Image (cartoon, helix red, strand yellow):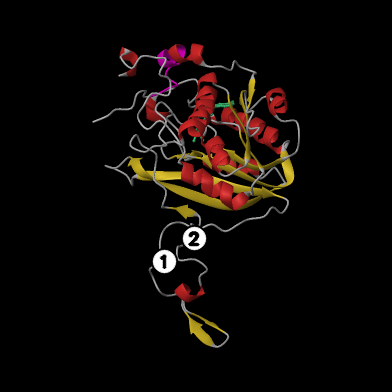
Amino acid sequence: MPKEAISRLDDNTIREKVLPYCRLKPGEIWEDPLKKHRIGVLDATSRKDCKKINNCKNVDLFIQDPPYNIAVGNKNTNQLSRINIENYLEFSKNWIENSLDMMSDNSHFYIWLGADQKRGFQPLPEFMILMRQYEELKSRSFISLRNQRGYGTQKNWMAVRQELLYYTKGDPAFKVTYTDIPKVLKGYYKTINGVKTDNLERGKSDTIRPGNIWLDIQQVFYRMEENIPGAYAQKPLKSIERIIKTSSKEGDIVADFFAHSGTTLMASERLNRRCITFDMDPVFAELTIRRLERYRETGKTGWQWENPFPEISSNDPLLS
Ligand SMILES: C[S@@+](CC[C@H](N)C(=O)[O-])C[C@H]1O[C@@H](n2cnc3c(N)ncnc32)[C@H](O)[C@@H]1O
């Protein structure tokens, strides 16, 4: 059975091998000559860095996927570690305020987050309360994405969720999207103009709306084309495309301060939006640029189980 070429790109020994092949150094920005996307190696908490990549209030849609303040796979790496909640809130405050600086008058703001069930569900509740202080933002929805695989199956309910908070500024347009799940259940009768109708007659689509619990999105794993070996926190393309289709239109500017495997960029490219994105780690910024280049060359959305850094021999014992 094939195996992913790289397990974790944030692992320091692998990072050091990959770093020489990254075209951007901290503080640098790559400008896409074709569709004007911008990709940088910047720090989301630094006002100076954020202004460097975009000094305007022109972002129509933010999709932010910050570290969740948990140690993934019990590894504490520079990119993904657990810090105390006060420091996490300070980190959050900084990147939120840098995002607010770029939001257009009528815009959308989505944030992915987790709740650590072993530690009082931090940081979700603290983060939600922090968001209340930004009066220009209106809370709109609290979405849960169901993961296919989970943890804690023996002595607890299996944890299979990721949270997505949705806020708006001003009054931006919202376009209803549908899942691929067919409407099969008849019911929800309602009398309209004296005639009793059921939901199948009344609905505009043959499929159901996603609502705020997303059950229909496959978690990324190494058999899927979109898989990016080494990216431990990759979001499914379908989830980001759903957000973009619902909350923006062609030509809009979409921004993401935590690029990682570049899913927001990939979705923006496919849906003709312009993307401003960065990661503080040159390895993930490089991966994001390579993913775009590969898509344009081959039409593929990821590497599946192949190595995104073929400069590094697949015989390297570190990669097995
Ligand atoms: C949860 S991942 C994002 C996953 C991404 N949405 C995807 O689908 O690939 C978080 C990323 O944030 C980056 N990061 C952490 N702190 C950062 C900071 N202060 N500024 C910018 N990026 C940061 C990490 O290097 C990591 O790649």
Q: Position of residue 242 (x, y in %)?
A: 52, 49
Residue furthest to the front: 297
Q: Give the residue at x 65% y 18%.
A: 27
Q: Which residues are magenta?
A: 8-16
Q: Give the residue at x 51% y 50%.
A: 143
Q: CA distance from mark 1 to mark 2?
A: 9 Å
Residue 160 numbered tag:
none
Image quadrant containing the C terminus: top left
- Indicate whether 258 appears above or below 272: above
Q: Nearer the viewer, residue 21 or 47?
A: 21
Residue that label 2 marks? 209
- Amino acid bearing label 1: Lys
Residue 183 numbered tag:
1
Q: Position of residue 290 (x, y in %)?
A: 50, 26
- Indicate whether 291 appears above or below 120: above
* Magenta-drawn stretch contains 48: no
* Magenta-drawn stretch contains 9: yes
